[in-house]
Amino acid sequence: MAHLLIQSLAMRCGYSASSIRERIYVDAVGERFGLLLYTGSPDAEGTLGGLVQQARHLEAHLEQALRASALCSNDPICPLHTPGASLQQRWLHGAACHGCALVAETSCEMRNDYLDRALVVPVLGTAGAASFPAVP
């Protein structure tokens, strides 16, 4: 979800995706989660204050992120990948590629590992694929 939000912010408000970084928080029990998006350096790409302003439109960014992530330019190949069951070098990825969920490695605290957009939205080839969100 963090990568999808980074891409939505980059597309809708002019930040480059490489200037936004993520931090994901999970409690020890695994019942509470948090997500922090922040700017990596105060330069021409934007400031933390600019991201705070965008938080006022978080619902719109979430809707855009979910709508845009339903389809990847590499579908139907992208969601058909099963982590660990391929001869490709994508052992730690599910339905994630440079066309949909990967961001700059400096933006991701886990170096783009363990990504699968099928955990967030229905993708082609899954049972929920018929229920894509409507694009206005």
Image: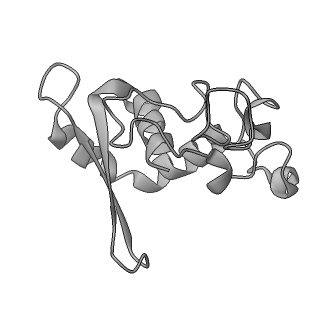
Q: Nearer the viewer, residue 136 or 16?
A: 16
Relative placement, left or right, of 77 versus 100 is: right
125 in relation to 9, above or below: below
User: Seen from this angle, which residue lies furthest left?
Assistant: 42
> Which residue is most to the top?
44
Q: Is residue 32 above or below residue 66?
A: below
Count of marks placed on residues: 0
Is residue 120 shown above or below 5?
Answer: below
Q: Nearer the viewer, residue 5 or 56?
A: 5
Is residue 20 at all visible to an observer of this figure? yes
Provide residue 1's location: percent of width, then percent of height. Answer: 50, 50
Q: Is residue 21 left or right of residue 134?
A: left
x, y (%) of residue 81? 75, 38
The answer to whether residue 15 is visible is no
Residue that appears at 47% across and 34% down: 7
Task: Name the side, left or right, on which 55 lies relative to 47.
Answer: right
Colour setting: one colour
User: Image check: 10 left or right of 51?
Assistant: right
Q: Residue at x 32, y 42 (%)?
A: 109
Image x and y of residue 116, in percent: 61, 46
Place residue 18 in its image quadrant: top left
Q: Position of residue 133 (x, y in %)?
A: 74, 51
Q: Name the quadrant containing residue 124.
A: top right
Residue at x-position 60% and y-position 48% = 66
Q: Quadrant of the C terminus?
A: top right
Q: Nearer the viewer, residue 65 or 77?
A: 77
